[in-house]
Amino acid sequence: MPDVCSQAQKTRFFIFLQRVLIGTLASTLLNLFILFPSPSFAEVVLGVVRSSENSPDWVKITTRLWESGIAYKPINLEEIKSTADLAGVNVLFLPNIETLTPAQIKVLEAWASQGGRLIASGPVGRSSPALVRQSLRSLLGAYWAFPLTQRATPQARSRCRDIACTTSSNWVPTAQQNASVLGGVLIPADANSQTVATWKDSSGSSAAIATDRATYLGWRWGSDGSANVDTAWLRASIARWGGTIGSPAAPPTATATPLPNPPSRVTRNTPGSPRSTPLSRLSPSGALPDPVPATFTDPSDQSAPAGLDVQANSNKPIVSIEAYLMRQELTNLLGRFESALTAANSANTPVNLNAATAPQLVAASNSAGGPAASRPPVLQSSRTGAIASARQVLQTFDQLLQEQKYAEARKQWVEARQLLWQNYPKEGQRVGAEIRAVWLDRGTIVAARSEQGLASVFDRLAAAGINTVFFETLNAGYTIYPSQVAPQQNPLTVGWDPLASAVKLAHDRGMELHAWVWVFAAGNKRHNTLIGKPSSYPGPVLSAHPQWANIDNKGRTQNPNDGKFYLDPANPEARNYVLQIVSEIANNYKVDGVQLDYIRYPFQDDNANFTYGYGIAARQQFRQLTGADPVNISPRDGSLWRQWVEFKTNQINTFVAEVSQLLRQNYPRTILSVAVFPHPESQRIYKIQQNWEVWARQGIVDLIVPMTYALDTNRLQRITEPLVKEQMLGSALISPSVKLLTLPEVVAIDQIQALRDLPTGGYAIFAVESISSAMQGFFNRTQGRPVRSTSAAEPIPYRQPFAAAASRYTALKQEWSFLLANNQLRVSESELKVLESRSDELAQALSKLAANPSTESLATAKRLLRSFQSQFQSSMRLHSAENSYQVQTWQNRLDSLDMLLRYGERMELNRR
């Protein structure tokens, strides 16, 4: 028997010692809060709010509260309906809650106006609607700007305005690594906001901000930082409002609803049987987080401005955070500008990393004849001037701030940014294999009217270098082609077969044609208008089979928000119908792929009592599984509600698996892609039951196409960067997307460059109808092949992943060769020799793998790639000093090779 008593004594002693140390730290922090005339409470009653975002860390949060000796009252966010729900609480703590609804923020405002005080931590409200975020800024006196890239230490300020708030060195824990947290930069929102802590070595960026009624801590409290830092700051934040802090409750315990055991294989249920295929094989381990009580928005909803709004003539002081953001935006824009320029200029450069001979080879190549489209563009003086101007501004920016020449600093910054936009590279071939996809929408198909009309569309796409077309094939319950399965062909295409024409036209032009299928959206109010049907018409499928409908908790089949009608994913007959459609498409047409869209439930908002999934089949199956009718449960039912969410998520996961199984068994060369939302995983699970990470990690889909729509490139990068990690993708490829609809030409071009600079498989454009003549010209110049070109097209990554990896690596070496030949690659002679040797070795391994794929050649390529990646940062240390964005981009492109090898192992080796 283990020494339980001894261990318990050790634990109690540790907690006692920790409380003593933390008490010392907190006492020094109290000086910071003698800043505002705040009310004093006889006793602080702390309410700690729980939501789905902090649910995975709830045990950590409450354990830390208990260890700190802080009593608290847990409050579920979804239960906050009025100020009465906060009765008795005078200090409310919002730990790491990113989503709140307008109704909840109104309650918090009313409660605060009655004397309540707030403490917040982490990116509070970041995923909330714009009006909610604005209200939070007023309540907290600050907002979360952006996350730090590495852990840092919050340091209490030695002075705050004219009021001394001296701290002692006892505030910082002795062990520096224990004092660091993974946080973000806060921005004061009004004149009453006071920065009480800054991030160490950050030029004064705010780590904690206080007002007379709120304290905002710029890190995720309780989840990823120092216990001493967390507790000291929370105790000081509470104690500033006077009174005593009650004793803690007993330590919390973790209770999680286990998921069922995994199945041995994916099965198709017979009609009427409960779909009990467990989620554990197709979902992450552990229980689902609590419901997200936030409004879940379409990815095209914009919540970020299109770049910084900098007034050139203003002499208002530039605070440290504004300076940081200005540097960051100009640095990244310059980086993308140079990436595009280097790619354009190096397209015809012979690979040569020998410093003695590279310049002569490049000079000979550039002087050779040939079509203008195939020669690298000249470095125009205006373009080099734009680069020089941006670099000069970045070098002198801090000096101007020190001299308090704020108007001049702003003026130079604005002019430099404008020069980059005006001279952005829009010509020169882009080489290296990539997915260049576009959605060909129903409107464009209908407008074509015939194969001849559609041919002109495909001619434009071919000239633009597009290699993948997502052709809208099943929309609003109608097939675009004459079907033997669907009840009706789209009335607007009756008389011809657009799908047959599209396949022929695409293949004649060397493009792939993927059938784009609306899976569970079966009727559309907007489409009804086009064909003269009432807005309430559910579409041909649900008109014939009303029992297949997905129903909301108020008994409605038409979604009141988007006007669409949806199939019940739990209905076996509805699922079988969609599978028959997919089978018909794959069997009767030589499509190269199938893309699943609307592979989800409709948007839901638990907090607004708006949920979906109450179809006849779903209710029957859930009753058989749990004994409960889902119409009688709510988020307040805890684990039973989580089972309901798991049940619905499982319907989507298993359907994707069934489509994958159908295609791989019968049409193994057909690529399966999914158009998905880019929101955080927990939000998607609770709002639309879409858990695409599971499909990717399990290898049941080939290509993830997230709808990363944004109005500015900064937001696009923030949305996309978390999605491209190996742990998210498994053996799948990813091709993020750009929505052209309202984007200026140069912004669209910049966004495409940003996606190329990340470790992606390529990009997708939404949609054909939005490609302007200017964008068509850009595509023609930069990725369209000359009409009479005899050169082979670049391999498409999802079709030839190993060949694509070799192609991409060659393009990367061409860039290094071009820069070396033009004395723009800063690498020492010894490091260059190592780089040349290792890069040649890797290139040979990738070429061998592409030519003769085998387990042995793949293992060699992986080993050499890992070795090259591990040494790359060292080889580029000199170049990185002034070109950090460029080096990071190269590292991303090396990571994309790893992604291609993972995918290729499954596609080219394991499927044999």
Image (spheres, rainbow, N blue to C red):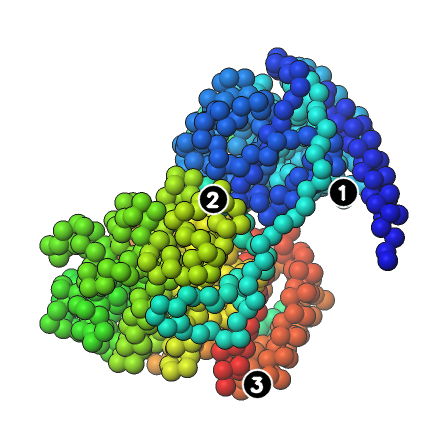
Q: Quadrant of residue 134?
A: top left
Q: CA distance from mark 3 to mark 1?
A: 47 Å
Secondary structure at badge 2 equals helix
- Badge number at residue 178: 1
Single out the mark in the foreground, 3 or 1.
1
| Residue in view at x 30 percent, y 60 percent | 567
| Residue in view at x 58 percent, y 28 percent | 92
Q: CA distance from mark 2 to mark 1?
A: 37 Å
| Residue in view at x 65 percent, y 74 percent | 864
Residue 813 in the image: x percent, y percent? Answer: 55, 69
Going from N to C along the chain, the mark reached first, 2 or 1, is 1
Residue linked to disc 2:
635
Q: Nearer the viewer, residue 448 or 622?
A: 622
Q: Nearer the viewer, residue 10 or 495?
A: 10
Single out the mark in the foreground, 2 or 1.
2
Give amino acid for label 3: Ser
Can you see residue 783? no
